[in-house]
Image (cartoon, helix red, strand yellow):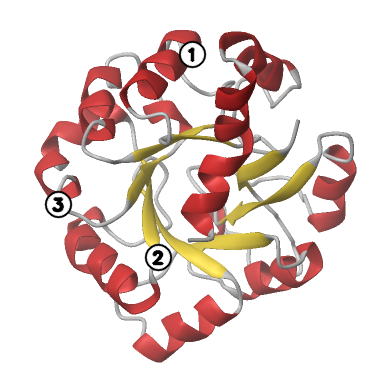
């Protein structure tokens, strides 16, 4: 088994950490992540900026240097960022732009159409949405036309799953992450997404599982191994995300 961890956070209080909706996360630096995943055969991954980190890039650049070239970053930026800044971030290992609709801390969703196209055209980045999939119908017509989009945490809700699956059929990718924070039938969601597009699902630990009702546990990986045969499991745990982030 090999893993490309498509979604985890590094929280370093040497850099700005902003209270969000009354919540301040715990410290979780690169060595904490490395120690916790030492037995998981993690060969690479994506460090994702959280709501509590706003537009700070310095923590992410430090973490990427610590983790090495097999890891990349997913960042939050204001739409006023310059082209030169985006190109510089790309050269430092950033590979995606995040819109955090659920928690805030990112650029407003009204900028999605312009901004997602801009970073894709400029640096080949995809854009990631942390959103309850029940809200997707409001922006589905925009998302369908964007060049590269992924949705976090299986879209979060059972109510949103049908809307998510429609977008999977249009080429949108989905992160199989945060099993302890979603409110849906995880097995059904995984199988339904895979049946529509075997390349769409990308596993991530979501460590350190900030605000989740239940943190990541090894049983989350075992669930995928039980549901899928070996080749499919490798796609979900490793190769789908590797190809998505390191095109």
Q: At 29% across and 29% down in the image, what residue appears? A: 133
Tag 1 residue: 186
The front one of 51 and 123 is: 123
Tell me the SS state at disc 1.
helix
Tag 2 residue: 125
Q: Are marks 1 and 3 in contact (CB under 8 Å)?
A: no
Q: Position of residue 44 (x, y in %)?
A: 70, 52
Work out whether mark 1 precedes mark 3 in sequence or the reverse, and give the earlier one.
3
Q: At 35% across and 87% down in the image, what residue appears? A: 83
Tag 3 residue: 145
Instruction: For marks 1 and 3, give the CA distance.
Output: 27 Å
Q: Is residue 51 visible?
A: no
Q: Position of residue 57 (x, y in %)?
A: 57, 73
Tell me the SS state at disc 2.
loop
The numbered disc on residue 47 is: none
The front one of 4 and 100 is: 4
Q: Is residue 25 left or right of residue 65?
A: left
Q: Position of residue 168 (x, y in %)?
A: 28, 32
| Labels 2, 1: front one | 2
Q: Quadrant of the N terminus?
A: top right
Q: Position of residue 225 (x, y in %)?
A: 66, 16
Q: Is residue 162 above or below residue 129?
A: above
Q: Residues within 10 Å of mark 3 (few under 14, many from 20)?
A: few
Q: Is residue 154 left or right of residue 66?
A: left
């Amino acid at each position: 088994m090999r893993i490309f961890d498509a979604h985890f956070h590094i929280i370093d209080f040497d850099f700005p950490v902003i209270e969000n909706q009354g919540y301040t996360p715990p410290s979780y630096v690169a060595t904490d992540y490395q120690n916790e995943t030492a037995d998981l055969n993690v060969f690479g991954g994506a460090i994702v900026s959280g709501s509590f980190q706003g537009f700070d890039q310095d923590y992410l650049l430090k973490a990427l240097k610590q983790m090495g070239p097999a890891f990349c970053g997913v960042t939050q930026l204001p739409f006023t960022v310059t082209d030169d800044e985006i190109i510089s971030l790309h050269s430092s290992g950033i590979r995606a732009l995040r819109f955090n609709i659920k928690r805030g801390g990112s650029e407003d969703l009204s900028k999605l159409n312009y901004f997602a196209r801009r970073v894709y055209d400029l640096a080949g980045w995809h854009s990631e949405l942390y959103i309850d999939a029940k809200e997707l119908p409001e922006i589905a017509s925009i998302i369908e036309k964007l060049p590269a989009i992924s949705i976090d945490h299986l879209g979060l809700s059972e109510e949103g799953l049908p809307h998510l699956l429609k977008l999977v059929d249009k080429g949108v990718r989905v992160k199989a992450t945060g099993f302890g924070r979603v409110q849906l039938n995880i097995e059904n969601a995984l199988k339904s997404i895979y049946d529509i597009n075997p390349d769409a699902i990308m596993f991530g630990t979501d460590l350190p599982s900030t605000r989740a009702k239940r943190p990541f546990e090894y049983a989350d990986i075992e669930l995928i191994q039980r549901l899928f045969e070996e080749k499919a499991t490798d796609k979900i745990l490793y190769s789908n995300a590797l190809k998505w982030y390191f095109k």
